[in-house]
Amino acid sequence: MGTLKGQELVYLIAMLGLPDTKSSPFDLRTQIGEMGGISNVWESQGEASLFVDELRNEELRRTEALLALWKQQGYEVTSYLDQRYPDQLRSIHEMPLVIWTKGKLISDKNAVSVVGTRNPDKWALQYVDALVDGIASQNITIVSGLAEGIDTRAHEAALKRELRTVAILGNGLDTTYPKSNVLLQEQIADSGLLLSQFKPDFKPTKYSFPMRNATMSGYSSVSVIIQAGEHSGTRIQGRVAVGHGRSVILSSQVAKSTEWGAALTEKPGVFVARNVDEAIELAIRYSTRVPDELSALLPQLV
Amino acid sequence: MPLDIHQAADHLSISVGGYLYGTRRGVDFCRVCTTPVIPPYAYCKACNDINHSASLKSMPLADMVLPLVYIDDEPQSKLLMHGYKGDQVGPEPQWELLLSVALMADLGLLIHRNCIESTLSPLTALSFVPSTRGRLDQPIKRIANLMSKESGLPVIEAKYIGPQPSTRGYSPTHYEILPGAVDPTHVLLIDDTWTTGGSAQSVATLLKLSGSQVVTVLVIGRWLRSSWPPSADFILNQMKQKPYTPFDCPVSGTGSCP
């Protein structure tokens, strides 16, 4: 796999932005696979009418200008067909076709998502600190969503211990949500990575956060859910992680006091940590998605 | 180092157990391919059609077909079956998906070899359904080679020689068996997915015409189409009660081996 030719990236981003592209990202990915490349799909969609062609050309010009701007802003734009695209995201069906990143894009094989409520209790904040402390000696990346509460604490705890941390955003890179995390967002970009599946000027919506949770699950080997309520958005991450073949660690609070947490414990790969020490042990064990003995088989398969 | 079956099984339970579901046997399922049917019908439409074409020409078919899991319209299971060979995820296989598919096939044989052999006869060789698109170094071939190394069974190679683009139906003349010195008495034929069974049954017929007495087909996934009403009902109400584990027996369709 090489790097996308510049023009193909322009076509891909332009297609995502065209209102008459009926395809979902999933259909578009299928189409690109079946038609043998982005350029072929782009060309096949042309010449529908003069009006459509005008729209397409306009979107191309706009995309080219934006790519130049994003470069100036220090954003890196990577498609799922690029070598630099995080490979683990290619194993989930919601893989974003394009990601915008700021910071250091590396493979992050051993990534642990630490997530939970925006309104944590004191015990939950201490739980986050102890968890991050406990895994700090390992080569593990702490992933979270830069939301208030548990997410913010997870990023801060990682930064304090000089652990790599990755924030996966529910908005574009130009925006900070919540506003109170402006400084934190800059610090993460400096020493870790900001990753968004949305165009930089995109403002968050109620749909973008669940989409972001799917990306977080895919980016990470395991998701640790520390404190959450019955209607917490975090429940989505537990559910999608199981559907992605990722392990999930629930604190006893989540497993006992929410219906969705209790239901999740029946699923393969879901573990309940009775205390933070157990959570540390499980997080370290499952931060490696594939045991070394099994990945040793790969040379025979590729 | 030999494969640690329990470690591999634990890995599979997590990596695919959350979205794949084990196949069933019994009166409510096609005798050949495990697709849901409504009794008294014993076969699904696709298998019935193949049975019919084969019997018109007096062609022998596979003795036993063992799909490990059902693949439904859920996008993650589709991604697995495409992405393991590099389709739709870029030009190269996604390695974790590839490893999962390989381990499913490998454990299918390692754990259930006795079930197959006590039901039919001792296995003597492996084979695989070749790509109809002329890909030479196909992932399924490498998976068969890995299984050969783990099980000690030698591989008989088949090749697609039919028209391009390929047709889906049952047509044994579109394949050929490459010559070799392997005992073909009971061949385990490996395939990734089963849609109509046309290609797997074509190769099974050909193996039998070339000297095999018994052919068992081991398939990773049986695609279920929700456009087939018994499948739609099964997907909605029953399928998810049985998450895939490599210990569930594809021969008996239950948690215990025959």
Image (cartoon, coloured by chain):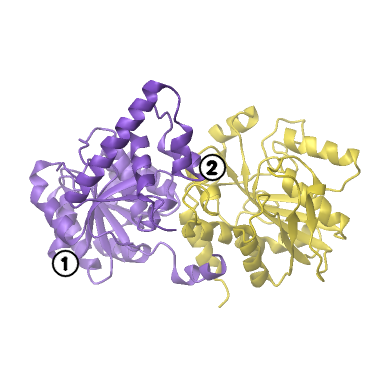
For image coordinates 74% across by 45% down, the residue present is B163
Q: Quadrant of residue B47?
A: top right
As drawn, the label of residue A162 is 1
* x then y, percent, for residue A142: 24, 59
Residue A264 locus on image (x, y percent): 39, 46
Q: Give, as a three-letter code, the residue at label 2.
A: Glu
**Amino acid type, callout 1:** Glu
- Chain assigned purple: A
Q: Is residue B73 visible?
A: yes
Question: Which chain hosts label 1?
Answer: A
The residue singled out by tag 2 in the image is A34
Callout 2: 10 Å neighbours few (<14), some, many (20+)? Answer: few
Along the viewing direction, whichever of B89 and A113 lies nearer the viewer: B89
Q: Is residue A90 left or right of residue B100?
A: left
- Which chain is drawn using yellow? B
Q: Earlier in the sequence, mark 1 or mark 2?
A: 2
Above or below — where is B221 with respect to A201? below
Question: For the point 84% across and 63% down, which residue is it?
Answer: B185
> Looking at the image, which is closer to me, A219 or B137?
B137
Callout 1 and callout 2 share a chain: yes
Mark 2 lies on a secondary structure that is helix
Q: Position of residue B79 (x, y in %)?
A: 50, 46
* Residue A13 quadrant: top left
Subunit of label 2 = A
Q: Nearer the viewer, residue A161 or B205?
A: B205
- Residue, x 76% and y 65% (percent of image)? B125
The quadrant where residue A69 appears: top left
Instruction: Tell me, for residue A104, which label it has, or none.
Output: none
Above or below, comparing residue B246 to residue B82 in the picture: below
